Image (cartoon, coloured by chain):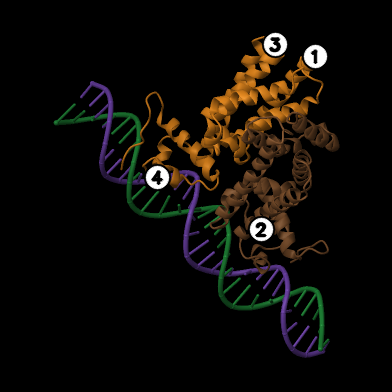
Chain colours: A orange, B brown, C purple, D green
Amino acid sequence: MSKIVTAKNTSKKDAIILRASGLFKNKGYNAASMRELAESLGVEAPSLYNHIGSKSELLQAICFKVAEEFTSQLHQAEISHKGSQATVEAIIRFHIRMMVEHYDEVFVANHEWKHLKEPYLSDFLNQRRTYEKKLVALVEKGITERVFRNINPYVVVLNLLSAVRGLEFWHRHKNKVDTQELEEDMVTHLLTGMVN
Amino acid sequence: MSKIVTAKNTSKKDAIILRASGLFKNKGYNAASMRELAESLGVEAPSLYNHIGSKSELLQAICFKVAEEFTSQLHQAEISHKGSQATVEAIIRFHIRMMVEHYDEVFVANHEWKHLKEPYLSDFLNQRRTYEKKLVALVEKGITERVFRNINPYVVVLNLLSAVRGLEFWHRHKNKVDTQELEEDMVTHLLTGMVN
DNA sequence: TTACAAAACTAACACTTATTAGTTTTTATT
DNA sequence: AATAAAAACTAATAAGTGTTAGTTTTGTAA
């Protein structure tokens, strides 16, 4: 009937993935049907297969795009050779920005990764473990440099990741707290609760 | 073939609900099939319907059991007329204990509630909103009494709930951090980062 | 041992799912 | 205007879903 509308410089595949992110976030991967996705794009379900290979490919695209962005930003932060505190702050701010600007994709990567098929599931979990380990190492380094307090670095990383993930709550209370204020408060609190 | 085995003082329905909690947690509500649930109980799927009404009834039972426990504990804490700080501490500790002792059920209530059917979905969300509001009010009271710092109470509650929910991460790192140490560290950190 | 109820079973249904095949329409290029 | 490629469509399929009906087995009490 109609056609899939794309913003300029984005392929139709990208348009589909973007819609899938919102749908998967709202209903969960399994409850979201291809018919539903197609309808939200103004198209019949089989038409999608002119642009994509399968439903699970959509989930893979979302999860690995997010994982890659976090991984590459962490890499940038590591090789920037700033101090430990500035590095951690940059990472926190990046997490917050991702959570605000790419909420749907990050949410899906956080909640629906378990529906990835092998070998993608193992791959994803490995990337995640690696990411967490690097974060722990970064905090440990800061501790030996006496930039950070001597708190169990696993607990610190757990608190950092929990706090930014907690922005999911905030997304349901947007009106209550201003965005910029939230970001500053959160960074300040997380850091000054941690820095010597 | 065989029979559903129950611990003493628990009905077969309760045994099914307990198994369903683990299954729903691991695979998600939609991906978990009744045949799978039945198999894990050593029984054929239709046999389950001698004890339960429907699949969604299982989800309801899990979600509302958890919601009720949190609600009633909050009520107990409120009428105990301890100081604001002691009250908040009791609530945090209860959250942590629930997360440790009833991980599966709490996880399902946190992640799979969106698959509840109406009117249960609205009911659940209302209970949740009420809970959060009471928590905010409690923090506000502490602020006016100058027991707590003057931080945006929504942000404080957000951080509290995020932190305890973050124990999901810890469940995958159990070996790295001792349980008791974790609880004490977390309470101390959350409170002394908040108390005057 | 007989009788009754609880709880298992098999078979089947109605429905939804992702996906494929084959065809027609649309779009772009010569 | 003719042609080729892209992308839509309709129809259909195989697999999986929760659930019901009807039947048989199991456990319990008289």
| For marks 3 and 4 on the same chain, the one whose residue lies earlier in the sequence | 4
Write down the chain letter for disc 1. Answer: A
Q: Residue at x 78, y 24 (%)?
A: A153
Label 1: which residue? A146
Disc 1 and disc 2: Cα gap in Å? Answer: 50 Å
- What x and y, as percent, mark residue B48? 67, 64
Which amino acid type is marked by label 1? Arg
What residue does disc 2 label?
A: B61
Image quadrant occupied by the C terminus of chain B = top right
Chain identity of mark 3: A
Residue at 83% over, 35% down: B184
**Does mark 4 fall on the same chain as mark 3?**
yes
Q: Which mark is residue A39?
A: 4
Q: Decide: few, some or many residues near mark 3? Use Cα within 10 Å; few <14, some 14-19, many ≥20.
A: few
Q: Residues within 10 Å of mark 2 (few under 14, many from 20)?
A: some
The Cα–Cα distance between marks 4 and 2, rounded to whole angstroms, is 33 Å
- Marks 1 and 4 belong to one chain: yes
At mark 4, the secondary structure is helix
Which callout, 3 or 4, points to the residue nearer the camera? Answer: 3
Element carrying mark 3: loop
Q: Nearer the viewer, mark 1 or mark 2?
A: 1
Chain designation of label 4: A
Name the kind of residue labelled 3 in the image: Gly
Of the residues tagged 4 and 2, which is closer to the observer?
A: 2
* SS category of the residue bearing label 2: helix
How far apart marks 3 and 1 lie (CA) works out to 12 Å
The residue located at (73%, 48%) in the rendering is B78
**In the image, which disc is placed on residue A83?**
3
Residue in the picture at 53% in, 48% down: A31
**Badges 3 and 2, same chain:** no
Name the N-terminal-most of marks 3 and 1.
Answer: 3
Q: Amino acid at mark 4?
A: Glu
